Amino acid sequence: MKEALIDPTEIVQVVTSWTENPNPQASPKYLPVYTPIENSARVAEVVPQGSQFEVAAPLFWTSCADDVVADQWYYDTATQQIIVVPPPAPYPGTTGTQTV
């Protein structure tokens, strides 16, 4: 078991789509569209159980599974569960194969 440091002041966001860059000469060609995850709070750090340190409110510690990784999981404030952050939407034009 591990302990996760939760920051309820930071809402977690995920890339849900892409929009074309308004400047056609600019790079990158597409810009990410971020959508906040409802009832989310950032998992800021994960440490072995017993290694927690003092934190100021509103930060707090909660127990979590051994596979939880900071910033790849979030704390759901409604259900009080730690959930993996969904993967980002695929970048436009990518098919999962590489052209050489």
Image: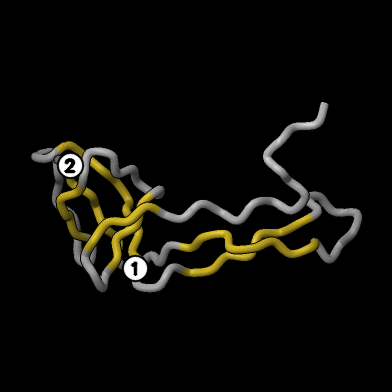
Q: Which residue is mark 1?
A: 9
Mark 2 Cα shell of 10 Å, populated few (<14), some (14-19), many (≥20): some
Query: Which of the marked residues, 2 or 1, is nearer the chain's N terminus?
Result: 2
Number of labelled discs? 2
Q: Quadrant of residue 83?
A: bottom left
Residue 25 % position (x, y): 91, 54
At mark 2, the secondary structure is strand
At mark 1, the secondary structure is loop
**Foreground mark, 2 or 1?**
2
**Cβ–Cβ under 8 Å for marks 2 and 1:** no
Q: Please name the amino acid that badge 2 sits on.
A: Lys
Give the Cα separation between the discs numbered 2 and 1: 22 Å
From this view, report whether residue 53 is shown above or below residue 35: above
Q: Which residue is mark 2?
A: 2
What residue occupies the far top of the structure in this picture?
100
Point 32% across, 53% down: residue = 43
Residue 3 % position (x, y): 18, 46
Q: Quadrant of the N terminus?
A: top left
Observer-nearest of 30 and 5: 30
Point 15% across, 46% down: residue = 53
Residue 29 % position (x, y): 81, 53
